[in-house]
Image (tube, rainbow, N blue to C red):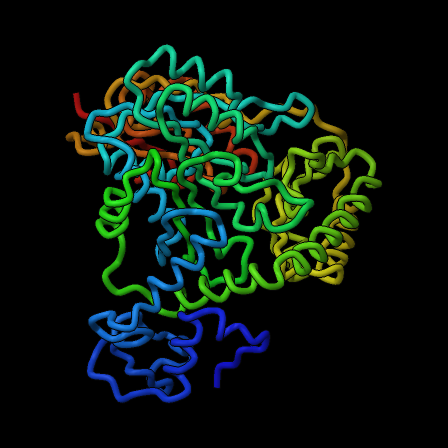
Amino acid sequence: MPTDPRGLRGAAPLLDAWLRFLEAPPTPFTIPGHKQRGDLVGDVVAGDVPLYAGLDTMKLSTGVLAEAEARAARLWGAEVCRFSTGGATHANQAVALALGHDGDRVVVSRTLHRSMLLGLVLAGLRPVWVSPEVDGATGLPLGVAPATVDRALRDNPGVRAVLVGDPSYIGTVGDVAALAEVAHRHGVPLAVDAAWAAHFGFHPALPAHPLQLGADVMVTSAHKTLPAWSQAALILASTERIDAARLDAGVEATATTSPAGAILASTDAARALLERDGEQLLGEAIAAVRAARDRLRDVDGLVVLDGPNVDPLKLTLVLSGTGADGNAVERDLLTAGLPVESADRDVIVGVASLADTRRTLDSLTAALTSSVERHRGSPRNVVAPMAYRVEPVTVLPPREAFFADSHAVPIDQATGRISAELVAPYPPGIPVLAPGEEITAQALAALDEARTAGVRVAYAADPSLATLRVVRR
């Protein structure tokens, strides 16, 4: 029988509805088709309660979802909140649909996740690209400079919005307050993909979250740094510059009509936990990561990302100075049962959350230290990955290229052609090529560099990258 060990059900209406359903399960003549029977395909369906005729009636007459979303809006200081069971991917695409009309231009950070870039395709928006600053000492991306956004807005009158991703995948934090000031001075909203920042703003040692800093809409993943089910995400917005009706329409246009109640209930439960116990739990996790960083800094040649502009719960390590190959270190960690979020030759990224403790971080630190020493070699120069330095050459709007007649060509014959697909090293899913862009020698070199470093190159129609899909001439 499902339990509520921290006593959250009274503060989380969706969690309460989920528990009540499982405490007195009905004999449903509705979907899902397993009808709550665990003897058919096993416990894999345990807890799979739908929203419709599950957490609520088929007519949504009890309003538990609306109540839960209102509670989340209050907690984050938003006027509108929508829960997503399709992750930040769905949430980003819903935001794109709310920001402008077909053919409108938006300023877009090149470090944004592919989901927002494909949101541009869905919405027919045209990107004005801006690139992040790159730290010369580590080769890793920082935030997009406010001056860069200001210049893009001045050079492109009529832009409808500014879209950035912050914090970055590796944990660097930009100046969101200054970005909001720049965007608002030009009369446009700032939308922030804060997928990795669901915990921001809930402990004194953490950065403020984007809405607190003046952003108009933020997307965040409850499943990344809060204890929610995979695919749990939230859209949070103020309505001074964001049309709430357009946002709702975007959410409904791209959402499933069969939302998983367990994901919704876990989002609500994570919100209630964050509201009641978040500062205590986050404080313990932050202290554990701080201790891990201090120990890892003693490893000769290992660079530990740190400082006031780094998420205190991200553990990002640059291995170049140790000569160790991060792919070999990752294999050791997997053998030890300690998978990390990302690893390539030069960089390892570990994600901590409020579920982590000194014990879990001590285990990871010990395994990392041992593995780096085992694989130590001649130090390498720090070089910024080319994926962060590609200068996109936009030839066609993303939507036009995505739907254009296309065909596959050998990759050695693709230079100068127009890409019909999005191709990105993953993680983190930042594109090297997007639909409508010229396939340049620089882009191809970035893809080759990523593969050589042990990064999976994702989303291409041909995973081997022997061919690329291009717009037919």
Residue 249 shows up from this direction: yes
In the rendered image, residue 266, in percent from the top left (x then y), is placed at: 46, 66
From what the image shows, is residue 383 above or below residue 11?
A: above
Q: Residue furthest top?
A: 155
Residue at 46% x, 37% y is 425
Residue at 29% x, 29% y is 435
From what the image shows, is residue 231 above or below residue 29?
A: above
In the rendered image, residue 176, in percent from the top left (x then y), is placed at: 52, 31
In the rendered image, residue 94, in percent from the top left (x then y), is placed at: 30, 44
Marks counted in the figure total 0
Residue at 78% x, 54% y is 366
Q: Quadrant of residue 282?
A: bottom right
Residue at 29% x, 34% y is 99
From what the image shows, is residue 1 above or below residue 341?
A: below
Q: Quadrant of residue 184?
A: top left
Front residue of 231/424: it is 231
In the rendered image, residue 268, in percent from the top left (x then y), is placed at: 45, 64
Front residue of 365/232: it is 232
Front residue of 387/145: it is 145
From what the image shows, is residue 219 above or below residue 51?
A: above
Using residue 382 as the reference point, say whether residue 70 is left or right of it: left
Residue 32 shows up from this direction: no
Using residue 204 as the reference point, say whether residue 145 is left or right of it: left
- Image quarter where the C terminus lies is top left
Using residue 173 as the reference point, say whether residue 237 is left or right of it: left
